[in-house]
Image (cartoon, helix red, strand yellow):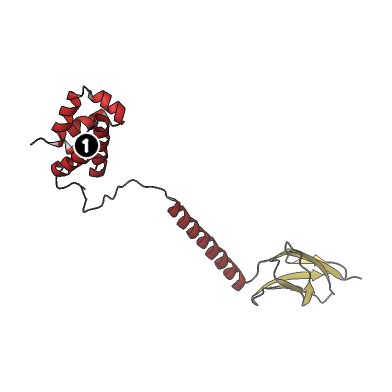
Amino acid sequence: MKTTGQELKEIRIKKKYSRSLLAEETRIKKEFIEALEAQNWDALPEYPVVVGFVKNISTALRIDAKRMVALLRRDYPPKALRVNPKPDLKTKFFWSPRLTFWLGVGLALFLILGYLSFQYVKFISPPELVVDGPRDGALAGGDKLKVFGRVDPDATLKVNNQPVLVDELGNFSTEIEISEMTEEIEVVAKSRSGKETLVRRKIKAESNN
């Protein structure tokens, strides 16, 4: 009883097809045709691909493709599907649209959670307050003293218990009344959560006389 490879080879030779010509007509590599005729299964791709080879060759040689596939099914080794019980951990990575979608969702969630966490920490933390002037121990002449600096834009600000306006960037500047008895100014920033930051500056008020 002839094998699949033997029959394909005999018909090819009978119809005066070289392997090169058959490869050109079927777009199957010459090496695969040679392996199929020799039934060198290890040199061939997976079983479903080999079935396609047999069908294409049968069409090119004008023989019954169903019969040749039936012969192949008989001759092909029992490990036709070559199932590997242990998945290859080095399988080639494929970037799919589904992976892109889930990565996008993950990134969006990460950014949202990060933003919410940042806002929460900012909400429960004391506001940032920088008093640029006056400096600690500064001499203050006259009956007024300029106080200026930077603070969180969302915070409320008081200087010696007097409310002070803060612009949209957090800058502030105000003048307070002082006297010879004034030894210290107190700047208090208060966040929306009620947290406070206090900065004190010692000053030396000079006599107006």
Which residue: 47% across, 55% down? Answer: 101
Rendering quarter of residue 196: bottom right
Which residue: 57% across, 64% down? Answer: 115
Which residue: 26% across, 27% down? Answer: 22
**Residue placed most toward the observer, 192 or 82:** 82
Say whether residue 91 is left or right of residue 130: left
Q: How crowded is mark 1: few (under 14 residues within 10 Å), some or many (20 or more)?
A: few
Picture coordinates of residue 144, whole percent (x, y):
86, 69
Which residue: 77% across, 77% down? Answer: 161
| Three-letter amino acid code at the position of disc 1 | Asp
Say whether residue 87 is left or right of residue 167: left
Rendering quarter of residue 12: top left
Rendering quarter of residue 175: bottom right
Say whether residue 102 is left or right of residue 177: left
Picture coordinates of residue 123, whole percent (x, y):
61, 71
Picture coordinates of residue 121, whole percent (x, y):
57, 69
**Residue placed most toward the observer, 199 or 165:** 165
Picture coordinates of residue 13, whole percent (x, y):
18, 24
Image height of 193 relative to 115, above or below: below
The mark total stands at: 1
Residue occupied by mark 1: 64
Which quadrant does the N terminus fall into? top left
**Residue placed most toward the observer, 138 or 84:** 84
Which quadrant does the C terminus fall into? bottom right
